[in-house]
Amino acid sequence: MNRLASESSPYLRQHADNPVDWYPWGDEAFARARAEDRPVFLSIGYSACHWCHVMAHESFEDEATAAQMNDGFVCIKVDREERPDVDAVYMEAVQAITGSGGWPMSVFLTPDGRPFFGGTYFPPVDRPGMSSFRTVLGALTDVWDDRRDEVEEQATELAGAIASRSRITRTDGTPAGDVGPHRVRDLVDRAVVDLARRFDADWGGFGPAPKFPNPTLVDLCLAHDMAGRSVAAPGDPGASRHMATATLDGMAAGGLWDHLGGGFARYSTDVEWLVPHFEKMLYDQAGLLRAYLHAWQVTDHDDYLDVATGIVDYVLRDLADPRGGLCSAEDADSEGVEGRFYVWTPDQLGGALTGTPAEGSAGAVADFFGVTERGNFEGRSILRRPVGGPLRGDGTVEAARRALFEARSHRVRPGLDDKVLTEWNAMFCSALAEAAAATGSADWSRSAEGIAEFLWSGSGLRRHDGRWLRSWQHDGGPRHLAYAADYAWLVDCLTRLGELTGRAEWTRRAVITADGLLELFLDPDEGGFFTTGNDAEALIVRTKDLLDGATPSANAVAALALARLGALTGAERFTEAARGVVGLLDGLLDRHPTAFAHALSAARLLEEGVTEIVVAGDRPDLVGAVHHRWLPTAVLAWGEPTDSPLWADRDGDRAFVCRNYTCGLPAADVATLQSQLDASAAR
C-alpha cells in the first residue's frame, strides 16, 4: 500500500494498492525528487474516467511497469477534480506538446515542477504510431541521465509557453466598460451565426462526433431567439430556437439520456447521441437542468419539464450523500464492463416484466425503446427514442419503465465518486433554485436550501475565518483551498436562493462570499480573477480560467454572478469587478465568441442593463409571475427587505420593474406586471 490510502479523493484511493510508489501532490514528493535528482512522473485523472481505469489496469497495476516507474521516477497521482489548478497548468503543457489533451494525463517534470514531456493515454505495448508506456519510461530515463541539457532547454521553453498560453493582459482587449450594447448584440449574432454553420440539422448539436452536451450554447440560442433575433443568418434554415430545441430533442431521445433513471451521460461517441461514454457527472446535470428548464419556460413543451424533473430525481436519489451534499459522479463501468448497468437484451427485458403490471407487453416495450436481438451496442441495446417522438408512452409503457428501473436496481451499480465538490454542488444548487422557483416546487426549494446549508455550515467547507475549501469527503472531511470557480458558483447559488426564497440571509451570504472572491482572486491590474487565491500554493504560473469548456469558465461565472449581485445590492464594487472581466476578455470575445458564450451573457447583462424587479408586501401571485418566466437579464428582490437602493420607498403590495434603479409605474396585478416584463425584454 502506498501513500494514497489516507487521501480524501476516491480516485486517489483507487490507486492505493498499486505497486507504484505513488505520492499525492505536495512538497514531500518534490523534495525527494530534488534529493535523489530524479524526474517526476505526474499522472492526472478522475474517478469516472474510463481510459484512466484502462491505463491503471494495464500499467499501474503491472509489477514490471511499476518497478520501472519506481526505479526511475518520483510518481505523483492527482485528482483533477480536487486540484483543477494543477490540472490546468499541465494541460497547457500537454496541449503545447501534442496539440491536444485529455485524461488520463501523463506529464514528466523536473524536480522544480517544470514539464519537459507529456501525453495522455499510453498503451502497454508498442502500437503503430504510439509508443508503449514502458518504452516512453525507458526513453525518458535515458534522456534524463545522458542529455540533461536537452531536458532543461525543453522545460524552460514549455514553462514559457504555459505562461503565455495561460495569461492575457488588457492589451489584448480594451478598457473595462468599452464593449457597448450594440457591439454585444453584434457579438451574440456572430456567435449564433457560427453555431449555425456547425449545426447538425439531422441530430442537433454543434459539430461532428464525439458530441458533448453544451448547455451554455443552447442557452445562448434560446436567449437570442427571445430577443427577437431568431434567424441565425440570411437564408439559413437553422433559427436560434430550432437549433436549441433540436439539440435538446436529440440528446433526450438518444442513449445519452438515461430513459429509466434520469440523468445524462458525459458525452456521445457518435453523431446520433446514441452511444455515450456512460459516466454521469454532477456538473453535466447542473448545466443541462438549466437548459431544459429554460427551454420549457420558453416553449411550454412538457417533454422538457419531464427531462428537467428526471435530472433532479436522479441527482437527489443517486448522488445525494446521506450526510449532506451531492457526490461528484458515477463511473461508466460496472463489473469491469463499460455500460453494462444500462443495456438490455430482449430476453432481459421480458424477464424484468414478468410478474409486473406490464407482463406480456415485452414486444411493444422493446419497440418503444428500440431493443432488438442484434442490439446497438456490443450485442445489447441502449434504450432510445426516435427524435421528435414523445418521450413518454401509454400506461403500459410507463408501467414497464417502472418495472425495468426496479429490475435494473438489482444490478451491480457503477462506482460512485462520493467526494463533495463545492463548485459542482453550488452549480447544481443554483440550477435547482431556478427550477424550484419556475415550477413552484416546495420540495425542490427545500432541497436547494439544504444543499446550501450543508455547504455553508454543515460540512466544514467554510472555515471559521470565512475561507472556503474545495472538497469534502465523509471519511476525510474538507480538503484543499477553494478556487475562483468555487467562489463564483457560490455567489451565483446564494444569490439565486435569495431570489427563490425572499430570505435576506441568502443575499447577505452571497455578499460575504463575493467579497472573499474579490479579496483572494481579483487581479487589480489587468482585471479578471486568478484561478488560485493569493494565499494558495505557488505553481509555476498563476493561471486564469477564461475559456468555456465542459463548464463555463470561472471568470465568466464570476462576471455574471457579480453583475447580478451588484444589481440586487447596489454594491458598485461587484459591478466593476464584473466589468473588469468583460474588458479583459474583449479581444477574445471578438475573435472567438462561441468559446466565451457565458461571458457574452455577462456582457449583455452589463451593457444592455439589468432589469430590477421588486415585489413589495405579500404578493405571491406577483412573485410567481416573475419566477415562472426565464428572464436572463433580470434580478428579483422580494420578501425580506435589505439595505439595497432597490428597496428605498417601496410600499404597498405591488411590483416595481426598474432599470438602473429607475422604475416605471407600480404594477398591482399580474397582467400589468407581465406587460411591463414583456416591454423590458423587448429592449
Image (cartoon, helix red, strand yellow):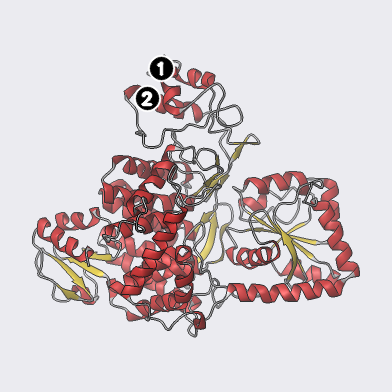
Outermost residue on the bottom side: it is 525
Residue that appears at 48% across and 67% down = 592
Outermost residue on the front side: it is 235
Give x and y (percent) for residue 210.
56, 47
Give x and y (percent) for residue 215.
42, 54
In the rendered image, which residue does mark 1 sit on? Answer: 361
In the rendered image, which residue does mark 2 sit on? Answer: 397
- The answer to whether 526 appears left or right of 6 in the picture is left
Residue that appears at 34% across and 49% down = 242
Q: Marks 2 and 1: in contact by CB < 8 Å?
A: yes
- The answer to whether 651 appears left or right of 19 in the picture is left
Give x and y (percent) for residue 306.
34, 40
- The answer to whether 247 appears left or right of 415 in the picture is left
Gap between marks 1 and 2 measured at Cα: 8 Å
Residue that appears at 80% across and 68% down = 32
- The answer to whether 384 appears left or right of 123 in the picture is left
Residue at disc 2, secondary structure: helix
For residue 84, the mark is none
Q: Bin the neighbour count of mark 2 within 10 Å (Cα to Cα): few under 14, some 14-19, many 20 and up.
A: some
> What is the three-letter code of the residue carrying label 2?
Val
Between 14 and 377, the residue placed more toward the observer is 377
Q: Quadrant of the C terminus?
A: bottom left
> What is the three-letter code of the residue carrying label 1?
Ser
Q: Is residue 346 visible?
A: yes
Q: Of marks 1 and 2, which one's residue comes earlier in the chain?
A: 1
Between 486 and 233, the residue placed more toward the observer is 233
Give x and y (percent) for residue 299.
27, 47
Outermost residue on the right side: it is 146
Residue at disc 1, secondary structure: loop
- Above or below: residue 241 compared with residue 525: above
